Image: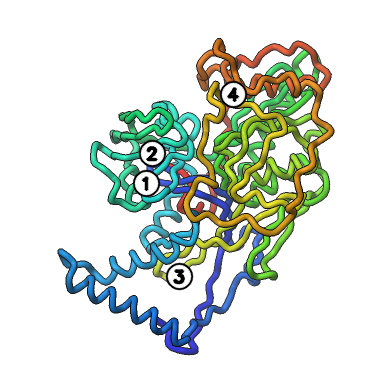
Amino acid sequence: MPEDGDHMKFRSGLLLGTAFLAGLAVGPGALRLAGSGDFPGAAFAREISHDNSAETVRLLTLLGTVMDVVKAEYVHPVSDKDLINNALDGMVGNLDPHSSYMTAAQFHDMQTEISGKFGGLGLQVQGESGHVRVVSPIDGTPAARAGIQPGDFITMVDHKSIDDLTLDQAVRKMRGDPGTKISLTVVRPKTGKTLTFDMTREIVHVQIVKSALYGSTGYIRLTEFDDDLEGAMHAAFDKLKAEAAKTPGGKLTGIILDLRSNPGGKLDQAIAVADDFIKDGEIVSIRGRHAENNQRWDAKGTDITNGLPIVVLTNGGSASASEIVAGALKDHHRAIILGEKTFGKGSVQTLIPIGDQGAVRLTTARYYTPSGRSIQGLGITPDIPVSETKDDDAYGYREADLSHILTNIGGNRTTETPRTDIPPIAKSIPKMPDASWPAFDATKPATDFQLQQAIKVINAMAGISNPAPATAPATEVKASAPAVPKPPEAHH
């Protein structure tokens, strides 16, 4: 410990996220890193002095005493390193669900494995009360193909219980070389059933934009906000314009932006995506304990669609960076939000390296939509509520369900004013599929109930009647590999 009068300077980077990346990934997020262009690096270098009050000294003495007792009396020998790491885990990890301490090895893993692809299963996972819960599977990965669902609790890896493991330890169990076999046992809370899934790890590509042309409507799905995502989205939009030019109408008439089960990623990419559709005004702001770190980002005057109607699809897996985009487009009345309420993660994390000893991922701010609202624990409410399945809420697991979450304070506390620009067709859109609707199949867009309703709405906004249902699956556009690491809660 530094002696009295010593100071430590921390360089830090900001994240918005909620999960882990292991042969899996861990939860929703959006990321800011020092030097990313939108980050006031110098302002975030802060001198930290230690509190040496009598009470602090007493408590630190207590910590040392407990450590001595455990070392002397525990059933088997325990190293100082393990005890101190356990203490650090508890010190930071119990603040809120998104703060954590990373050892040097964990921090190194985070930096080296986020290369745009990794060997894993394609799951977003989140720690909850000592258990590992699935946030969402990543499209086209072993986990998604196997049928693992949001909300599932992972209880066993290769038929061995993980109940006594930390989230990081459990994630490490699920990591492995591409081509190796793994078995996951889950408990599905909605049915109470225990299910076992046998899978093969593979290279998981995490930077994917999917696009398709349905009639004259362009469909763009963003699976995660990683480096260069906005560039890939822009390329997909240009491709759709070129395809639409060959149709009888000769042009695009609307855009569906699919953010369902998108757990977030980099803040600068969320801002860039929103900026592509909003000409002017605020996109997002962050406010924290230190006023000099508060910041606001505004649109730069370009709408790549030239004002085309937009419908944004959301569900309970749309988190953080996805909520920034959805909130900005909703507040500016630039898009209609259709689907289910989003996850509700409205906090910002700062990644603070601690010399060569690891790093702290610390919640340092809340973010606010252009109307000044914090979505922390609340999420973005859709303008047209439509469930994915016959279940009233297929997702059923959000930020508000986590233990010791950050409170929602500050910002605009008034009741949200109902929009007056919702198209009349909204009144005829069913809130969920009926009993005759076919089971969802990712390869068959005609089975995607929310997508089909979005097509109806976007065509009504464009003045097109009786649109044909979407039938062709979306194609993938891969962005280039990221140049900077993601937080330790990303994907695997």
Residue linked to disc 3:
354
Residue linked to disc 1:
131
Q: Split into 4 quadrants, where in the image is the C terminus?
A: top left
Badge 4 or badge 3: first in the primary sequence = 3
Whether residue 47 is situated above or below residue 109 in the rendered picture = below
Whether residue 97 is situated above or below residue 323 in the rendered picture = below
Whether residue 225 is situated above or below residue 348 in the rendered picture = above
| Residue at the image position 49 percent from the left and 56 percent from the top | 404
In the image, is 183 to the left or to the right of 456? left
> Residue 230, position in %: x, y?
65, 42
Badge 4 or badge 2: first in the primary sequence = 2
Mark yes or no: residue 420 visible: yes
Task: Describe the element under mark 4 as helix, strand or loop.
Answer: loop
Compute the Cα span from label 4 to label 2: 30 Å
Res 45 quadrant in image: bottom right
Whether residue 291 is situated above or below residue 122 in the rendered picture = below
Q: How many neighbours does mark 4 have within 10 angstroms: few (below 14), some (14-19), or many (20 or more)?
A: many
Compute the Cα span from label 1 to label 3: 28 Å
Picture disc at residue 474:
4
